[in-house]
Amino acid sequence: MSPPIPRLIVEPDDGLEPVVEFINSAQDSLLVKQFTFTEPSLIAAVIERKRAGVDVRVMLNAQRSGGDRANDDTYEQFRSAGIAVQWASNKFYVTHEKSIVVDEKAALVATFNLCEKYFTLTRDYGVITYNPYHVAQIVEVFNADWNHSDWDCGAWEGLLWSNSNSRYHMAQFIDLAQQRLDVQHPKFVDAVILERLAAAADRGVKVHVLCGGKHGISDWDVLDTFASLRTLRRFGAKVHKQKNLRVHAKLIIVDDVKALVGSMNIDRSAFDLRRELGIMTDDPVAVGRLKQVFDADWDLSHHYDAPDPLDSAAHHEDDFPHDKDLIHE
């Protein structure tokens, strides 16, 4: 008997309810690994599961790359509730993975953090997978990181892991495209992935890039991002800037039939230094909705001419209010 089909979550359209519902479905065990976790109703849902007798373990990223700490209060709330909680493995610069595993039978792989703004202000996605190989591997990595042990991906099951295989499999995924590539990502800071996207455009694939402009990009990443977007345009890619929502999603769709969703930005650090998790799906319902959302966002967007990276005076963008807490890792 095949496992249930994956379930897609689209934010902010679907809101908190599907994530609360997923947490509440845990009867035996609940594993939570998060970069930032501050949303009160989700914190309460995890604590309620502990009180209901579920075996709960939570792993939180200790600090962002800039040194600021967002999870200290959440950590104390969980500790006070008797939940086994600890900081993520110090083998990684940061743990940017956003996953939840219920009863070792289902796993949520998301682009969103568990914070209010990612359910209200940003475009984000999550995939709930029931594939036993996916779930077992996510549990295996959770346990390795919990024990601060080394882990390397020995079996390819459709999950992308940083710092193990994510760049390779994202590049291979892009190489599959024959007619169209839809890319909804905020950062473009990796020469390998840039070359793969440019090669796709060069071989005649229609490449549509939906970015967020400068919003949320650090000063040290904006130069590469602007240069990459300008390079893609020279190869014939269409580059738009999203207008209806801030871009926090990390989505690539190949030929309208396969999709890649995950926590990793197109960024050297995301591939090489951080713990990240992505998932591929060819489920027609999930891919169909992802395509529908991408197309709707594209229709509301506009053509984007990335500024000259060296002309800092042209870098100012004020179409979204500044948010000091939304920095793309």
Image: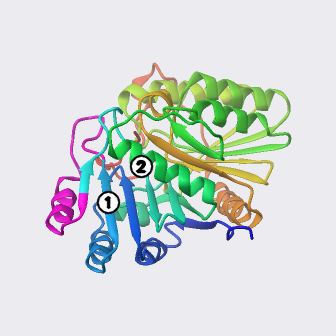
**With 54 as the anchor, is 306 left or right in this view?**
right
Q: Verify whether residue 67 appears in magenta.
A: yes
Residue 242 drawn at (x, y percent)? 56, 51
Q: Residue furthest top?
A: 310
- Crowding near pointer 2: few (<14 within 10 Å), some, many (20+)? many
Residue 251 drawn at (x, y percent)? 61, 49
Amino acid type assigned to the residue bearing label 2 in the image: Phe
Amino acid type assigned to the residue bearing label 1 in the image: Arg
- Judging by the rendered image, the residue that carries numbered circle 1 is 57
Answer yes or no: do the residues labelled 2 and 1 have beta carbons within 8 Å? Answer: yes
Quadrant showing the N terminus:
bottom right
- Residue occupying image coordinates x 44% and y 29%: 269
Q: Is residue 302 visible?
A: yes
Mark 1 element type: strand
Q: Which residues are magenta?
A: 61-84
- Residue occupying image coordinates x 70% and y 31%: 197
